[in-house]
Amino acid sequence: MKAIILYDTRSSGGSTDRFVDALGKSLVETGAYVEKGKCRATADYSFLQDFDVVIMGAPVYYLLVSSELLGSFFQSNLKKYLRRKKIALFLTCGSPEPMATMMYLPQLKIHMVRNKILAEKVFAPQELSDIQAIDDFVRNITHSYRSAIRNRNSELVWIEDAQELLAQIPSFLRNRIKIATEEYAEEMGYGEITPTVIDEAKTEFE
Ligand SMILES: Cc1cc2nc3c(=O)[nH]c(=O)nc-3n(C[C@H](O)[C@H](O)[C@H](O)COP(=O)(O)O)c2cc1C
């Protein structure tokens, strides 16, 4: 697995910087190749093409996910290069977890509705240096990544409703749409093709 930790923080050498180093170390111990990079709202994110997994996160300041990461979704090509990427999300903040999950994680997730989210976690201040919490997060990422890859290599099943939809497509287009949908499903790590997957694939290729 080639992973990049893409993150932001306003405090150089602060809690998020130290957390990212510990996260990277834990990932490397699983055999992953890992790089880290700090977000800039106007950066060129084409380098993400080289990675299988993007692990993304930042602290919350004044109720908002740190601005260089949030701003990248609006001012750069980040969204374009995240298409079809497998993602893991983390936040570092002082709020209780349920509140942070409801208020802060959606600030990132709203830009990634079509991505496969392998794992997500809000890290409370005391968890940022907790090796066990970090290792658990890494285990969730690698476990979900491996199942996605396993699905990719196994035979795709078209469920009955999806087969019916496919049958309604004019015959001269049917095979092309079937192949494109299967490619999309494999890329996303889906084990079966449902009407929802067809819908997602359609949006993707429009
Ligand atoms: C100026 C400032 C504003 C903050 N605002 C929030 C906030 O609105 N909600 C929250 O849950 N945590 C807030 N926090 C807590 C930080 O998100 C948390 O301490 C984080 O680990 C800081 O990361 P850093 O050390 O990399 O800057 C704030 C911290 C600071 C310093």
Image (cartoon, rainbow, N blue to C red):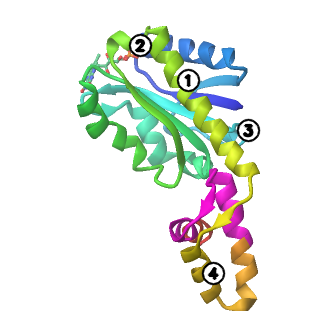
Q: Which residue is mark 1?
A: 138
Q: Amino acid at mark 3?
A: Asp
Q: Is residue 87 above or below residue 27?
A: below
Dot 2 amino acid type: Leu
Q: Residues within 10 Å of mark 2 (few under 14, many from 20)?
A: many
Compared across the picture, whether 2 is left or right of 10 comes to right
The kind of residue tagged 4 is: Leu
Residue at left offset 50%, top offset 20%? 136
Q: Which residues are magenta?
A: 179-200
Closer to the eye: label 1 or 3: 1
Q: Label 1: how many residues lie within 10 Å, few (<14), some (14-19) or many (20+)?
A: many
Image quarter for ligand 1: top left
Q: Nearer the viewer, mark 2 or mark 1?
A: 1
As measured in the structure, the alpha-carbon distance from the residue carrying label 3 to the one carrying label 2 is 28 Å
Residue 88 visible here: yes
What kind of element bears circle 1?
helix
70 left or right of 115 in image: left
Which residue is painted at 57% across and 81% down in the image? 165
The amino acid sitting under disc 1 is Val
Q: Quadrant of residue 27?
A: top right
Rendered-image quadrant of the N terminus: top right
Circles 2 and 4, Cβ within 8 Å, touching? The answer is no
Q: Residue 199 magenta-drawn?
A: yes
> Distance between the Cα atoms at labels 1 and 4?
38 Å
Does the closest atom of ligand 1 sit within 8 Å of the Cβ of label 2? yes
Say which mark, if any, is on residue 128: 2
Q: Which mark is residue 50?
A: 3
Q: CA distance from mark 3 to mark 4?
A: 34 Å
Instruction: Indicate which disc, 1 or 3, sits on the residue closer to the N terminus.
Output: 3
